[in-house]
Image (tube, rainbow, N blue to C red):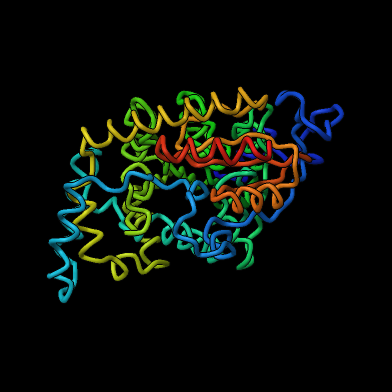
Amino acid sequence: MNRKEWFKNSGIYLAGGLSIFSGEIMPRLKSINDIKISLKSSRKFVSDFDFMRTMPSDKNIIRLMANENPWGPSKRATDAILSSVKEGNRYAFSLIDNLKTKIAKYENISFDQIILSPGSSNILTGAAIYNYQIGGNIVAAEPSYSDMPDFAEEIGCEVRWVPLDSEFKLDLDAMEKNIDENTSMIYICNPNNPTGTKLKTSELRDFCIRTSRYTNVFVDEAYLEYQDNPKAESMIDLVNKGLNITILRTFSKVYGMAGIRMGYAVSSKDMIEKLKSTTRSHQSLTVTALSGAYEAFQETEFLYSIKKKTSESREYLYSILRKEGYEYIPSSTNFVMFPINMEGERFVQEMWKRGVGVRSWEFNNQNWCRVSLGTMENMRFFEKAFKQIS
């Protein structure tokens, strides 16, 4: 049965859009449960890159706006990066193979099922170009990490934006209802950015198994390493089962290499070849990034240390918000989102004046702040600034 026949038989159609939760939106939030999910939100959301370009270049600012690891790379990774500088006159081809071999062994996949990239961004834009070439629409959530679907829309792809559910998680049922015979890709960010929520592993797995029979499913696992058992929650094993799944990973978050730029995707050999045709990933990789990533990959003690410190900062932030009378979306990541009673841009500027950089969003008729988790010293600085305007 082909994809078109399946849609006719399954009864999955776009019939007048998604249902909207009823109820009045409070202009000033009393409870996070008062926020209703609406079909429309304030697109477009500004990317972290574009947002940070608008900010003053003050090195004394506490950076809590880009989900960076404030503790930086491990010593092993740093030493490897510094040592590799003297090899900067050589192309990095052998180092590419070394890192791919290490990843393949850990993930129990073949060498040619991996594509490396400076961060995951290059792969995401390559995926958008691929989807433009083959035609069809992309199903994506909002708010979510939108660099790929935003770029796809800019180059002429149709993107079907699906609101989050009442728990601020990706609404898999609604996303599935937006799929039709012309859907070329579903994009999932789990755990989700900017809300910090994650899906139940079993529910996401069932969704991927069902929908990948008829279209490409991209699962962005940028924040997966912050989980207690990331390997158990990953969808990579579905790739080995021959399903039409692509998994995206990055060294920018828990590994602390956001400015060094390294990421990768795992998929079928066929999809990897297609992505290679729309990216310049290997030609963009440096000896420094490859050397650091090779030493950092699955460095167990370091990863445990970063997750522990992140958890401590997160709990401290929760306590700050509770003391000030704010609710928040429980987070599975290195950032926390909470509703604010002030226009978002003004809130950001007021925090910036007090030496703290944060991000704001507006969706569901509510202004939100997203705070990246810093060191305990950073969080105490945030607390002092926040209390002045909260």
Q: Is residue 150 left or right of residue 40?
A: left
- Is residue 148 placed above or below 384 in the rendered structure? below
Q: Quadrant of the N terminus?
A: top right
Q: Quadrant of the C terminus?
A: top right
Q: Is residue 116 left or right of residue 171?
A: left
Look at the image and tell me whether residue 234 can be seen: yes
Q: Quadrant of residue 368?
A: top right
- Is residue 225 placed above or below 67 in the rendered structure? above
Of 127 and 346, nearer the camera is 346
Q: Position of residue 128 (x, y in %)?
A: 52, 60
At horizontal 18% and vertical 66% (from top left) the residue drawn is: 93
At horizontal 54% and vertical 51% (from top left) the residue drawn is: 355
Q: Position of residue 387 (x, y in %)?
A: 63, 35
Of 49 and 186, nearer the camera is 49
Number of numbered discs visible in the structure rendering: 0
At horizontal 19% and vertical 67% (from top left) the residue drawn is: 92
Residue lying at the far bottom in this picture: please name it: 89
Of 91 and 186, nearer the camera is 91
Q: Is residue 213 left or right of residue 168?
A: left
Q: Position of residue 61 (x, y in %)?
A: 49, 54
Look at the image and tell me whether residue 190 can be seen: no
Q: Position of residue 172 (x, y in %)?
A: 60, 33
- Is residue 149 placed above or below 282 in the rendered structure? above
